[in-house]
Image (cartoon, rainbow, N blue to C red):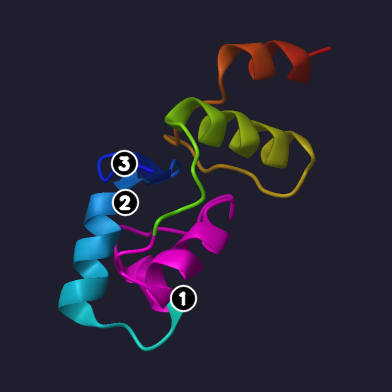
Amino acid sequence: MELDAKICYCFHVTRRKLVNFVRQSKPKVASQLSECGGAGTGCGWCIPFLKQIHAQAEADLEILTPEEYGRRRAEYIQAGKGKPPPGATPLPEEHNAGASE
């Protein structure tokens, strides 16, 4: 995943910001990445990816395009596993349409 790709859609936190936070702050546990712009404290979708970033600052996240990452997040939210806060990146259009049916 590219460095400028959003990891936390709820609070618009990029991979670059998280990787730099890990390098500079050296958090002891992955949950401390929430101190980086609130990452992981919204819907919860990005928590597994935050754990990967914490485990290795140079982590090669699962090879996903930003579009695939967004689609998987939409499926996660529509399955009732998380609720984005106000102001979060909206779900892709095709997933928004399916939510109202």
- Residue drawn at x 49%, y 43% as measured from the top left: 63
Residue nearer the viewer, 41 or 21:
21
Residue type marked 3: Glu
Pick out the residue farthest to the right.
Answer: 101
- Residue drawn at x 31%, y 51% as measured from the top left: 15
The residue labelled by disc 1 is 31
The residue labelled by disc 3 is 2
Q: Measure the alpha-carbon separation of dots 1 and 2.
A: 15 Å
Instruction: Name the disc covering residue 98, or none.
Output: none
Name the quadrant containing residue 95: top right
| Of pointers 1 and 2, the one earlier in the residue sequence | 2
The region drawn magenta spans 31-59
Magenta stretch contains residue 1:
no
Residue type marked 1: Ser
53, above or below 65, in the image: below
- Residue drawn at x 49%, y 25% as measured from the top left: 67
Q: Position of residue 98 (x, y in %)?
A: 76, 15
| Count of numbered circles on the image | 3
Instruction: Give the quadrant of the C terminus.
Output: top right
Q: Position of residue 94 (x, y in %)?
A: 65, 12
| Of pointers 3 and 2, the one earlier in the residue sequence | 3
